[in-house]
Every structure is written in structure tokens, then in C-alpha cells.
Image (cartoon, rainbow, N blue to C red):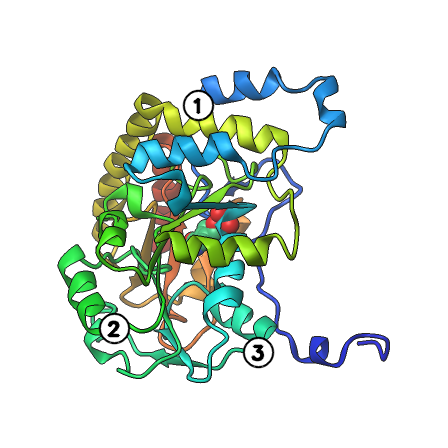
Amino acid sequence: MSTLWSPAIHTLQPYVPGEQPKQKRLLKLNTNECPHPPSLKAILAMNTVADESLRLYPDPESSLLKTAIAENYKVSPEQVFVGNGSDEVLAHAFNAFFRQTLPICFPDITYSFYPVYCGLFDIKYEAVPLDHKFRICLREFPKHNGGVIFANPNAPTGIALGLEDIETFLQKNTNTVVIVDEAYVDFGGESAVELIHRYKNLLVVQTLSKSRSLAGLRVGYGIGDVDLIAGLERVKNSFNSYPLNRFAQVGAVVSIEDSEHFTQVCALIIQSRKWLSDELKKLGFEVLPSSANFVFVQHSHLSAADLAGDLRSKNILVRHFAKPRIENFLRITVGTQSECEFLIQNMKEIVEQVN
Ligand SMILES: *Cc1c(COP(=O)(O)O)cnc(C)c1O
């Protein structure tokens, strides 16, 4: 705390990211990174821009990237916004659309960055409880709101909503912006992108951090009506004209175009997720039905906090949230098949030791 800070900074409650250990020998299953390498074509393309062109600023509009994303989703480049990770896209969207009189709404259990942005931009919010099976209930969202955001599949539950549920909600909620955060959609969810043509208040946000194995590159994007995108561009150009560097723009284009690699990686994750879920069930875990690259699990009689500690002592990191309703759950990222096997082997030892 410092008296030199702007007054509003004192009350901010910043997001706490999962640990990025300095120690190399840990198995990281705590931040939902993809265990498989990114597109080799993308890496090679980025190598070609490690040259004297770096003395020049990058394209402020990221035009080639917007075109590549537009082609991939069959929309126009004017319906695409890109940012330094989808976190930045979300921050600009909160700033551009959610600073309203009425509170915005999101599920009580969801991505914990949403309340952080509300703090930063002084936005009031109402958290709408998930149902008893940890599903998002759009029916329960207040009719009068300043905006709505939810992750689909949701985090950290991994549970996906169907497109019909989202469309039914959009038919009623026409006057405020609805953001669907699709960070995990490629692992088994249904994207709402096709709905942007019919619902001008819908913004769909995706990222290259999870299914494209490029968390280190920091590239995310939003797809929506041209008027929404124009609002985002206003905010972006009032903050940072060059959010995507030269490597990010080139690497992201090639990664988006390498659909063969993308399809393979997603299939591997889905296959290992099934195996991991089945094995955890055999060890006495309840596993929520996941459409993401992680599973959210609780044991019938062992405490999640203890399990996280026991795994850590075996050099495995998983994520535990000490929050109401989910304090006995662990979120475990789906690794490679051999990483999943290593986790299960260690988990077996822990569970058997206690029994
Ligand atoms: C990982 C994640 C993001 C952020 O992704 P970046 O593009 O790496 O900033 C956004 N939303 C959810 C729900 C996530 O899990």
C-alpha cells in the first residue's frame, strides 16, 4: 500500500494465476496449458521474423491475422477483434460494454478473472448460482442486467451448455451484450460463433492458449457484430495500439491455418480425458462431465486440499480453489497420455496409503 497510488487501486483484488514453477521437474497439470507442442509450421514461420524487421512496429490492426480468423470462422474481418491473449480481449470488452447502470451477471462459479475486471472498471455484478449438478442456468439470470458473461464450457467445472440453451437466452436478452468465453470450446463444446449473425449483442471470445498450444504467445480474439468490434477497437486504440507483436501475428496466422495439427491435438486430449476420467472414477472420485482439457473432481472421502499437497510432494501440480461450494474439488489438466498415467499411478499410491 502506498499513499502515492490512485485511491481506487487500494481496493483492487487482482487475479491470482496458477503457479508457474521455476523448477523444471514438476508435472504441471494446474493451468490448463496444452501438453502437446504447437504447430511446427507456426514455430518455423516465427523463426523467419527473428530478423532486422523487428526494429519496426508491428501492424497495429493485425490485418493478416484478422483475415485468417475470419476465413476460419466464415465471418468478415470487420467482425473480428484480436488482443494480447483473450484476457485482454475480455478486459476491453468489460470496459467497452459493461460499464452500465445495472449490474452485469455471471455464474457464481466461473473464471475468476470476471470479478477482477469488475473491480478494475468499477462494474457492479450479480453472481447467479450454478444448479445442484454444477450446470449454468441461463433461465435464472435476471431479466434486467447490465450485460452477461459466461464461459462455455465453464471453468473450472468443464461442463458445456448446448447451443439451443444459449440461443433461447439470446432471444430474451436482446438489449445488453452477452459474452460467451469459449477458451475451451475446441475440446468438445459447441461454438456460438454462427449466432453472431442473428444476435447483434453477442460477442464470442476464443484463445490460442489452450487448443492451439500457444499460451506463451498471448493471442486471443473476439467475434461479433461490426458495431461491437468497433467499440472494442475504440477502447484498444485508447490503450495500446500494438498489442500483438510481430511473432504473435505471424505465428497465430500459421497456427490458425494448420487445421490438421489442431484436429490431431484436440483428438488426443479428448481421448486422454476419457481415460483419465474413467481411472479417477475407479479410485473413488466423482468426475464432472468435462468438455474441456481438464477434469474437475472430488473424492468420496479424501480432502482436496490434502490431495493437492500430497500430489505436490510427488512433484505434480494441480489446481485447488479454496472457495465456497468447490473447496473439495481439484481441477486437473489433461496431460499427454503418459502424463495422465503418471498422475493415476501416483494418485493410486496416495489413495491406497490413506485407506
Ligand atoms: C485460459 C482462459 C482464458 C484466458 O486465456 P488467454 O488467452 O491465455 O488470456 C480466458 N477464459 C477462460 C475461461 C480461460 O480458462
- Rendered image: mark on residue 6: none
Q: Secondary structure at mark 2?
A: loop
**Total labels drawn:** 3
- Sequence-earlier tag: 2 or 3: 3
What kind of residue is marked 1? Ser
Q: Is 23 located above or below residue 48 in the figure? A: below
Q: Which residue is mark 2?
A: 173
Measuring from the top left, give residue 101's x and y in whole percent. Answer: 46, 84
- Residue nearest the viewer, comparing 142 with 146: 146
Measuring from the top left, give residue 168's x and y in whole percent. Answer: 15, 66
Does residue 111 appear left or right of residue 199 in this picture? right
Label 1 or label 3, whichever lies nearer to me, is 3
Q: Do the residues bearing badges 2 and 3 touch, measured as CB atoms within 8 Å?
A: no
Q: Residue at x 21, y 56 (%)?
A: 198
What kind of residue is marked 2? Asn
Q: Is 209 located above or below residue 183 in the figure? A: above
Q: Do the residues bearing badges 1 and 3 touch, measured as CB atoms within 8 Å?
A: no
- Sequence-earlier tag: 2 or 1: 1
Measuring from the top left, give residue 146's x and y in whole percent. Answer: 40, 78
Label 2 or label 1, whichever lies nearer to me, is 2
- Sequence-earlier tag: 1 or 3: 1
Label 2 or label 3, whichever lies nearer to me, is 2
What kind of residue is marked 3? Asp
Q: Is 340 located above or below residue 145 in the figure? A: above
Residue 46, by quadrant, is top right
Q: Which residue is mark 3?
A: 122
Q: Is 343 located above or below residue 67 in the figure? A: below
Residue 17 seen anywhere in this rendered image of the structure: no
